[in-house]
Image: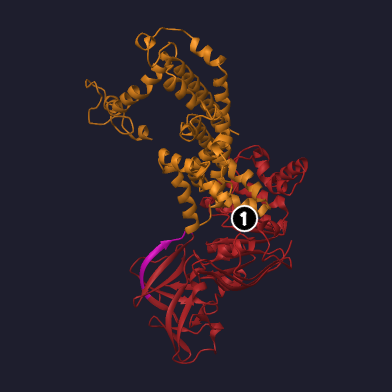
Amino acid sequence: MAAIELRGLTKVYPGGVKALDALDLVIPDGEFFALLGPSGCGKTTLLRTIAGLEAASGGSVLIGERDVTGTQPGGRDVAMVFQDYALFPHMDVTDNIAYPLRIKKVDKATRRDKAAEVGARLGLEQLMDRRPGQLSGGQQQRVALARVMATQAQAFLFDEPLSNLDARLRLEARTFLKKLQRELGVTTVFVTHDQAEALAMADRMAVMEAGHIRQIGTPAEVFRRPVNTFVAGFIGSTPMNLLDGLVRGDTLEVAGCKVAVPALAEGRLSDGEKIVYGVRPEYMTYSDEPAEGGIGGKVAIVENLGASHLVTLDVNDVIVQAVVPEGSEPAVGDDGYAVPRSDRALVYRDGELVS
Amino acid sequence: MAQAISPPEVIDGDPSGRRGGYSSDAAGLGRLRAGAFVAPALLLIAAFLVFPALWVLYLGLTNYRLTGAAAAEPQFVGLDNFLDAVANPTFWNSTWLTLQFVLGSAVIGQVVLGFTIAWVLRDRRGPLKRLVEGLVILAWILPSAVVSFLWVALLDRDGGTLNALLGIPGFAWLLDHPMLSIIIFNTWRGTAFSMMLYGAALGNVPPSHLESARLAGASGWQQLRDVVFPHIRGHILTNLLLISLWTFNDFSPFLLTAGGPDGRSEVLAVHVYKVALQSGELGYGAAVSTIILLINLVVAVFYLRLLRSKK
């Protein structure tokens, strides 16, 4: 068990693409940490640089206070689950799980015992003699996890661990992985492009864009108070409303409507300033009647989300979305009013959160 | 797949079963038309491959000669030619030399060298890789006559390039080390095929499997043993099968040493040429050819068995 620390970590690919730009990051011992971002943001490069599969162009990587920047992957005492699981097709489950032990020259009986023990813990008892080709995707993932667990490494690295599973299995595996990580207590870094996955599983997460970390925090912090408009737009199953606006005295003018200044930004704005007003559709109260501080418009689209509906309002040619509980959804073409919760609404100046 | 999506075949009166213009096979041709497409190729194979092979089988059972009375009226002699061959020390010497030639130049030389080059160059880009590949492939595509002349010029005793480079004029490579010479020659000549085959095969090894082994701490050799070789096992066996057979039947050593000196590089292909065409004993030569054919069959069956067996 060990903390992972990155100091000024930089990775430049041949050809000049800067995948990581002087990153500083500390992941404490035992934490379940998510690296989240869109394709090409550098999250996988970061994970691979921690593993040693990519050589850093600058800065250093410390695992358990040991500088491993120049160490080969095999000497870093980390274990990794790959997106395709990387199980060896010619070995059965036992041999796959025990492979890292075999490389470490552990004797055969001990290897088999360890593989059986870890396999049993992950519910693989009946499958120990099978080849990976005879296993389902979920079973293969558990074998890959078992292989990682058998190494007793200082830290685990997961590269998109759930992306090869179908939607239903992904939810189960999410719960399973989080429970397993909690029980093992091993520092774990995982990469995902799915914000829901990161929010659900991680203790803390980093949101990355173009080689930079845009925000680090707990899922609650990142969801409630995205520190810039990039994170605000990236996090959330339904995208946050980000509306251009102006400060008018002690109110804001957004999409031609007057709304109250959010609690967080109170007293920090000056008259006439250009801002971006952000509020999640979930933090809007919808009503059919004109309401004080509400944004009024015509209902353009109603999307069914199951237990609620996503209502899209056309407000003076600006799109505003609100989540409406089931049973009270409006019809398309109705007039509707969405009132933002002032304790949840946010104001951004030059793309950065005003707080 | 085709059967699953095609409607059932309609057979009502029309003998070809082509009513509506389709058939249940993938191309929708029907048996007759498909046969017509294949027939020309089959005829060519029959005329130039099957018939000569059967003719050799027959000749091996006669005392047919290139010239003289036996050329006009060959007599059926049964298995005499085969018994002669088995009793002939030159035949056994040639078989032993052929074995050395195949093991030395194909199995060890071409496979090991070809794989090594492919492995070393697998992640390389740029001019060095293209240069090495270009040179190796050049050795493969040049005509035999040209290549043999180059090697004779290289290894010549008095004016040879190699002796000039090494500063040992008068060293007779082709006379003192004939087998070594043709083994190195054939390794140089044929490595390109193995190199390209392994180059393609290595591209199929998933990078994550190698990385997984590296993270476990596997050395270069352990990565080869545990990841690469199991993945390209089929390629290795196919490669071995092909180059073993090609090398076994290779005649180009004759162009360098003419089987000499004193039969010391007379591999089976050269042996057959000498007895059948130089000494004119076509019947005996045909019998030895039949034996070569049988050895080839055994080699092929051996590799194909390995290829089919799992694990």
Is B232 left or right of A149, judged from the image as shown? Answer: left
Three-letter amino acid code at the position of disc 1: Thr
Is residue B282 highlighted in magenta? no
Q: Residue at (45%, 39%) from the top-left corner?
A: B148
Where is residue B149 shown, x and y percent of the image? 44, 41
Count how many numbered circles sit on residues in the image.
Answer: 1
Chain letter, red in picture: A
- Local crowd at mark 1 within 10 Å, few (<14), some, or many (≥20)? few
Where is residue B57 shown, x and y percent of the image? 43, 16
Where is residue A125 shown, x and y percent of the image? 68, 40
Chain letter, orange in picture: B
Q: SS at mark 1? A: helix
- Compare residues B128 and A225 and report the one nearer the observer: B128
Read off the magenta span.
A297-306
Q: Residue at (53%, 12%) from the top-left corner?
A: B83
Q: Can residue A136 be seen in this snapshot?
A: no
Is residue A299 highlighted in magenta? yes
**Which residue is identified by label 1?**
A175
Magenta segment's dominant SS is strand
